[in-house]
Amino acid sequence: MATRRVVYPFTAIVGQERMKRALILNAVDMRIGGVLIRGERGTGKSTAARALAALLPEVDVVADSPFNDDPHHPETWSDVTRERYGNGKNQPPIERRRISFIDLPVSATEDRVVGTLDIEKAIQKGERHFEPGVLAAANRGILYVDEVNLLDDHVVDLLLDSAAMGVNVVEREGISFSHPARFILIGTMNPEEGDLRPQLLDRFALSVEVHGIHSPEERMEILERHIAFDSDPEGFRKQWAAEEQKLSERIALARERVDDVHYTRYDLQLIARMTSAMQIDGHRADLVILKTARANAAFSGRDHITREDILLAIELAIPHRLKRGPFADAQVDLSALDAQMQQLEEEMGDDEGDANQSSQAPGDEQSSDKKKVTP
């Protein structure tokens, strides 16, 4: 019997704080829409993705469901679980499972990803038979695509559509089947091997650029930790078990409170003005920034977002959406975002209009403008 591979601990990864935070925030709220990690080889991209899966807490699932259906949310159930248990009228058997980590090969086909309907069986016997694909296996887990820039564009579209909608619907010859497909989509790539089309880049909610660490002290720390891990993987993991458990519990608590994180109209105005000033096309970025800011607030233990949450969210959501090239005029120095936000806040404070909207600070708990985002 094969032994389970020991995964390098997430909390033992040296540096790369922006990458780790982007992954954690997607774990807090899968509705954010995934993260694209771009960087040279040997910078810990795949290590971090696998480590996150090993870190995350177990989840309740319908025991006889191949789709990891959530027993506490019948409205999200797959067709087969809904038929078995009557939209939640009958209590399904429940078990705890570790979340799945699905590694999608770049050669994956559409049928392999979305699954297939057996049309012949449906016609001959009147039975609807669905063979689950990658999206079914990844539901409520992590779907990892290394070298995502080499994956067929159509397949990337399918993944991003499912990540955004949280459901996979397969239709063939008038027959359809649906199941939940809510997962953390992690794509990694080396820009030297080619980039994604701008339309696909925009569909990834967050992006981070990772580089090799140049600090001699940190490089030595990386070396020592990897030597220790290679020598005794199980012992090394035990050394980091307390830190891993602490972070896992913090993510679990953040998941419970993220829907209760409030925001103000002032926050919305600040987000909209920032994306407008940077000439960001479309409105997807604005929604991503809001969701990311709320996830960061929940992870930080707060029930309201602050300007720091918004600033971090912009830094994660904007870089891959900036216009680039010799004719682009929307180049933005990300290091100057704080100053740009401060300037906009001063302008907003000077605007005429509703006093509450112009003078209240983000996160003011007494504001009458507090709202919740629609999941």
Image (cartoon, grey):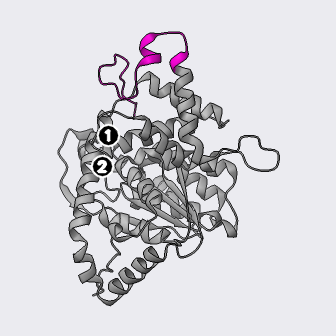
Residue identified by numbered label 1: 258
Residue 186 image position (x, y, % from top left)? 49, 59
| Residue drawn where x is 25% and y is 52% of the image | 250
Q: Nearer the viewer, residue 66 or 197?
A: 197
Kind of residue indicated by mark 2: Thr
Vertical order, 48 against 21 (above or below): below
Question: Where is mark 2, residue-wise?
Answer: 81
Residue 141 vertical placement versus 33 (above, below): below
Rounded to the nearest angstrom, the CA distance separating label 2 from label 1 is 27 Å
Secondary structure category for the residue under label 2: helix
| Residue 270 coordinates in the image, percent (x, y) | 51, 28
Identify the magenta region: 349-375
Query: Which dot, 2 or 1, sits closer to the camera?
Result: 1
Residue that extends furthest to the bottom in the rendered view of this protein: 231
Can you give x and y, in whole percent of width and height, for residue 95 in the image? Answer: 19, 58
| Residue 153: quadrant of the picture | bottom right
